[in-house]
Image (tube, helix red, strand yellow):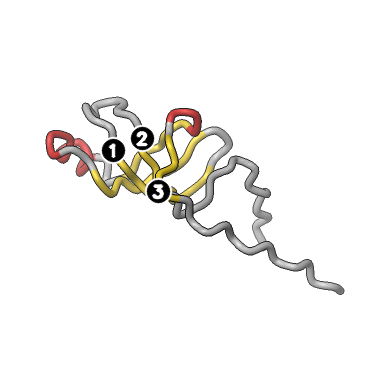
Amino acid sequence: MVEEVAENTSGFNIGDVLLAPAYGNLEKPFTGQVEKIYDNALLVEITENDPVDQPTVNEMNHRAVVRMDEVEVIKHAPAPEKKAEEEA
């Protein structure tokens, strides 16, 4: 079975480095790298955080789901290359 991947129109790419605000039990903003893109949110691997938040980050397995409109891109990852459609 082949999964169809929807075209990404969010303006984010997998690998982008983001600054995200504190939310939930996190007290301070954190930086992270985009792992998955949803309709209005991003799954982010937390790469840098305030030491006061370390126990919470550990409980979250260094992952967070953040809203797209609440993050700031620090560094863009290269856009994935578009695959040429194969002729049948």
Expressed as whole percent of the image width and height from the top left, the position of residue 26 reads 24, 30
Q: Are there few (<14), some (14-19), or many (20+) residues within 10 Å of tag 1? A: some
Residue 17 is labelled as 3
Indicate the secondary structure of the residue bearing disc 2: strand
The quadrant of the picture occupied by the C terminus is bottom right
* 74, 55: nearer the viewer: 74
The quadrant of the picture occupied by the N terminus is bottom right
Question: Three-letter amino acid code at disc 2?
Answer: Ala
Residue 20 is labelled as 2
Q: CB atoms at circles 1 and 2 under 8 Å apart? A: yes
Residue 54 is labelled as none
Q: CA distance from mark 1 to mark 2?
A: 5 Å
Q: CA distance from mark 2 to mark 3?
A: 10 Å
Residue tagged by mark 1?
30
Q: Is residue 49 left or right of residue 86?
A: left
* 31, 40: nearer the viewer: 31
Question: Three-letter amino acid code at disc 3?
Answer: Val
Picture quadrant where residue 38 is located:
top right
Q: Is residue 30 left or right of residue 2?
A: left
